[in-house]
Image: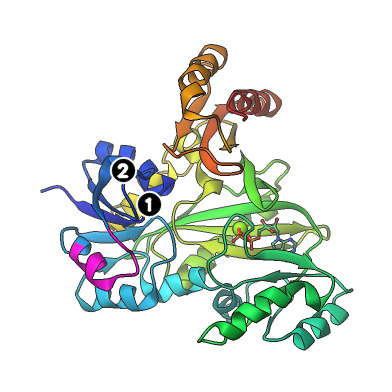
């Protein structure tokens, strides 16, 4: 009988597991938040991921449960484990991707390099951190942020007043995370796959470009990366995967500082935007790798297929009625470009797809990827 993987969450990450699942003979099912989502091709159920009953009912029909996002509450995850469901990544690991304060504290214990940080529960504490760090810092809501939502550069504690007010109304009390404003030359991402039985494999470290807090482009491998940088990044990724007991794909977002250090920004325990290049640019793409890892199957080779891969996100996107015509134009102009669409309605700034191009000359690969993606500009 086919191995059965159930994905909680119906977004584009679940969608992109579908093709490799078909190839591997894995039966993929998806618990989607609503009908018509990106992964609706494989959606066998629609339900609330915060509802333990709904998630348990979904989980009973699969061999392994995994995720499209990190928002499934801990009590629901624990209920699955208590019911004997195989959950990868498990709740003990996932807590560090669900809450940036919990993550910072644990990474400190592991001795991982990080920006200076503190938990602040009122404006006075935030102001004290600002005073100690040159008057500017980055404030983050510990939970639920994505694509730069929940991240704010501030130079006065009053600029986070609304977030402190929201905390006060939160029954759990809680705190905000504040970090030094890192002087980085660029952002990198290190991906690692890890199986429950322990095998762990790193991808080459990549360069990511964020615009307005949203990933815009990824270059793999990271240009101008010396052997030491590559080794240190891989070591950070493997140490975190092992130290936190991550199963499946892990992405570690990193800052490369002006004084040549690598600092951990944040973690994602699932396939990640920084790894989309691997669909077309690596021997084993991250979505296939995630399925192999959560099923505890031998991992695939992470070696790039070509010297360079560039991924460009399609943000916003054209209205549905012009999509077909634009597709035809891209296909004609860029036969080497691989376009991946998410089946999502366009909204300003929303990730609706991406383009991968691979090849030998970085300038050319970059040009082709940008030119192909630009066909989909609003
Ligand atoms: N401490 C920091 N110093 C400088 N820039 C930061 C810092 N933290 C975050 N950023 C910028 O904000 C972006 C989003 O922050 P991140 O914590 O990764 O939030 P999200 O969960 O929205 O991805 C980062 O990719 C980086 O560009
Ligand atoms: Mg991030």
Q: In terms of secondary structure, where does tag 2 sit?
A: helix
Quarter of the image where one finds residue 182: bottom right
The residue identified by callout 1 is 290
Residue 104: within the magenta?
no
Residue 4 in the image: x percent, y percent?
20, 52
**Residue reaching furthest to the top:** 332
Residue 83 in the image: x percent, y percent?
19, 75
Q: Does residue 174 show up?
A: no
Front residue of 56/95: it is: 56
Residue 7 in the image: x percent, y percent?
31, 55
Q: Does residue 278 show up?
A: yes
Q: Where is 327 relative to 284, above or below? A: above
* Magenta residue span: 47-57
Q: Earlier in the sequence, mark 2 or mark 1?
A: 2
Residues under labels 2 and 1: Cα distance?
19 Å
The residue identified by callout 2 is 40
Do the residues under discs 2 and 1 have CB atoms within 8 angstroms?
A: no
Front residue of 307/174: it is: 174
Q: Please indicate whether residue 362 sits to the left or right of residue 88 in the image.
A: right
Near mark 2 (Cα within 10 A), the count class, few <14, some 14-19 or many ≥20, is: many
Quadrant of the image containing the C terminus: top right
Q: Where is 171 relative to 69, above or below? A: below
Q: Where is 301 relative to 190, above or below? A: above
Q: Residue at x 66, y 75 (%)?
A: 163
**Residue reaching furthest to the left:** 1
Q: Residue at x 55, y 29 (%)?
A: 318
Front residue of 73/133: it is: 73
Residue 297 in the image: x percent, y percent?
28, 53
């Amino acid at each position: 009988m086919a191995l059965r993987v159930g994905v909680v969450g119906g977004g584009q990450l679940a969608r992109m597991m579908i093709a490799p699942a078909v190839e591997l003979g894995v039966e993929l099912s998806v618990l989607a938040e609503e009908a018509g989502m990106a992964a609706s091709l494989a959606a066998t159920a629609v339900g609330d991921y915060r509802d333990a009953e709904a998630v348990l009912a979904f989980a009973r029909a699969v061999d392994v449960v995994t995720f499209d996002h990190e928002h499934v509450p801990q009590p629901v995850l624990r209920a699955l484990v208590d019911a004997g469901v195989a959950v990868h990544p498990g709740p003990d690991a996932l807590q560090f991707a669900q809450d940036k304060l919990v993550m910072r504290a644990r990474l400190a214990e592991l001795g991982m390099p990080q920006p200076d940080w503190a938990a602040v529960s009122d404006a006075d504490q935030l102001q004290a951190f600002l005073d100690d760090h040159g008057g500017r810092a980055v404030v983050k809501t510990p939970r639920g942020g994505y694509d730069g939502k929940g991240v704010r550069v501030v130079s006065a504690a009053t600029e986070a007043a609304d977030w402190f007010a929201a905390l006060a109304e939160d029954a759990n009390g809680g705190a905000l995370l504040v970090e030094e404003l890192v002087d980085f030359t660029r952002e990198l991402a290190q991906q690692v796959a890890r199986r429950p039985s322990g095998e762990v494999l790193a991808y080459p470290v990549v360069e990511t470009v964020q615009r307005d807090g949203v990933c815009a482009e990824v270059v793999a491998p990271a240009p101008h990366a010396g052997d030491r940088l590559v080794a240190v990044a891989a070591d950070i990724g493997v140490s975190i995967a092992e130290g936190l007991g991550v199963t499946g794909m892990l992405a570690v977002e990193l800052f490369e500082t002006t004084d040549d250090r690598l600092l951990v920004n944040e973690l994602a325990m699932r396939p990640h935007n920084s790894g989309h290049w691997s669909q077309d640019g690596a021997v084993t793409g991250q979505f296939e790798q995630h399925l192999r890892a959560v099923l505890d199957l031998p991992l695939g080779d992470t070696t790039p297929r070509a010297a360079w891969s560039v991924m460009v996100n399609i943000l916003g996107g054209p209205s549905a009625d012009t999509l077909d015509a634009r597709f035809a134009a891209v296909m004609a102009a860029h036969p080497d470009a691989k376009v991946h669409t998410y089946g999502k309605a366009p909204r300003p700034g929303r990730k609706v797809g991406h383009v991968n191009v691979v090849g030998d000359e970085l300038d050319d690969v970059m040009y082709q990827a940008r030119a192909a993606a630009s066909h989909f500009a609003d």
